[in-house]
Amino acid sequence: MILIKLLLSSLMIVTVTEVGKRSGKVGGLLLSLPLTSILALSWSWWESRDAEKTAQMTTETLWFIIPSLVLFFTLPALIRKGVDFPWAMTLSVMMTLGSYVLFFKLKG
């Protein structure tokens, strides 16, 4: 089962990056879809058959989307300001991690 999960998850990532090379708009659309969440929730339910656990994980995922948005605002802003991609990604990830820390403190 782990091999199947690994292959399907890898296929998803490769597909999104290949489509993104050809069309930024379609690649962005695919990237915005909660494909990872759909796969992870499906695997979790499939292995546990626990609908309540899956519902709880879905609710927690919804809350964690809020601090993750920092990445999607800061990365393009930094790149457009002329920051090289590796540095822009590093700074964006650091700011996103900071937003998660703040979110955990506020959420309790």
Image (cartoon, rainbow, N blue to C red):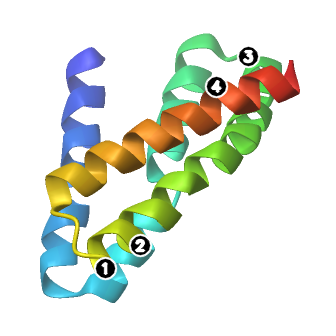
Which of the two discs, 3 and 2, sits closer to the camera? 2
The label shown at residue 77 is 2
- Of pointers 4 and 2, the one earlier in the residue sequence: 2
User: Residue type at mark 3?
Assistant: Asp
Q: Upstream in the sequence, badge 1 or badge 3?
A: 3
Q: Which residue is mark 3?
A: 50
Mark 2–mark 1 Cα distance, whole angstroms, equals 5 Å
Which quadrant of the figure has residue 9? top left
> Label 3 to label 2, Cα distance in Å?
41 Å
In whole angstroms, how far apart are the C-alphas of marks 1 and 3?
45 Å
Q: Earlier in the sequence, mark 4 or mark 3?
A: 3
Q: Which residue is mark 1?
A: 80
Instruction: Indicate whether 8 appears above or below 106.
Output: below
Q: Quadrant of residue 25?
A: bottom left
Tell me the tag on residue 101: 4
Indicate left or right for 6 with 107 as reference.
left
- What is the x, y in percent for residue 88? 28, 56
Q: Earlier in the sequence, mark 3 or mark 2?
A: 3
CA separation in Å, label 4 and label 2? 22 Å
- The secondary element bearing badge 4 is classed as helix
Mark 4 neighbour density, 10 Å: few (under 14) some (14–19) many (20 or more): few
Q: Tell me, yes or no, whether the two marked residues, 2 and 1, touch with CB atoms within 8 Å.
A: yes
